[in-house]
Image: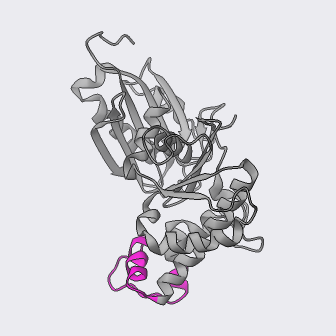
Amino acid sequence: MTVPPSAAPLFAALDIGGTKIAGALVDPAGALTHRIQLPTPAQESGAAVLAVVHRVLDHLAAAPEWGAVGAVGIGSAGPVDLVHGTVSPVNIPGWRAFPLTAEVSAHRAVDGLRVALAGDGVAMAAAEHWRGAARGADNALCLVVSTGVGAGLVLDGAVRPGPSGNAGHLGHITVDLDGAPCPCGSRGCLEGIASGTAIARHALDLGWLPTGEDRSARAVAADAQAGHPVALAAFDRAARALAAGIAATAALADLRRVVIGGGVAAAGAVLFDPLARHLDQYAALPYIRGLDVRRAELGTDAGLIGAAALCR
């Protein structure tokens, strides 16, 4: 596709997760326009989920600026397979080895455009390294703690997805050897303890009673901020698991900076205070002690900005 000389090149970006499917047009400076977000029908068929992706693409393609789009970037819940262009999100059962790159490429408006795929954690890392809290870091771990737990690695000054696209996939490392089975096939996974879904489930198991009908991690966070002991315990357990995973990754890859985003990170001090306490215990080796832990700066737009960064 040829972009007219007078038009700034744009990127189309998709952010696909277990809760939402978002899209936007992104300019070379990382600014978003024509943003759209729709719920993910995660428990429905793979075709139903793809239909929402196509609705998002239809919305973007209707924008007058679509003619300046030179590539489409996708950040998807994983694991992903960059070799085959497929995704198998743990929290979208209808997508197993789903040919997402081919399906997006087949959309009538995308035909002929380059399509770049990455896991959502890698996309978030690309965004925060480009415009956010990982700017200037040669080595960093960037985490998305939301419906699931994803992560991406910055090594030697660049985002490194690995051959399959799953380098840094922290949510599915085992942090509890005798833990509960995980849908991924393993057990005791970090995601099963520290995700928003896991926090809410554990709080309910401990006897937490929400004041309204909202039983999400957001409601648990609100009660934790008010000092509710069960809600605080649920966040402390999640923070401990995160600390174990972060410390192990830092020890393995010799990292100094850690960036944490996603909906659970919005809980603020009720997550970050116990995380700092547990990191003091787990990150004990001299070269990883005192990790530089920062909150992500790009909020809910990180996945879209990162998807665009993949195309740069």
> Could you tell me which residue is drawn at 73 percent across and 61 percent down?
186
* Left or right position of 189 against 178: left
> Could you tell me which residue is drawn at 64 percent across and 55 percent down?
170
Q: In which quarter of the image is residue 173?
A: bottom right
Count of residue discs: 0
Instruction: Where is residue 249? Give x, y as percent.
Output: 70, 55
Instruction: Where is residue 130? Give x, y as percent.
Output: 46, 37
| Quadrant including the N terminus | top left
Q: Nearer the viewer, residue 260 or 193?
A: 260
In magenta segment, residue 95: no
> Could you tell me which residue is drawn at 39 percent across and 49 percent down?
298
| Colour scheme employed for the rendering of this structure | one colour
> Could you tell me which residue is drawn at 63 percent across and 62 percent down?
290
* Left or right position of 285 against 85: right
In magenta segment, residue 214: yes
**Depicted 82 relative to depicted 281: above or below:** above
Instruction: Where is residue 216? Give x, y as percent.
Output: 42, 72
Report the span colored magenta.
202-228
Instruction: Where is residue 42? Give x, y as percent.
Output: 47, 55
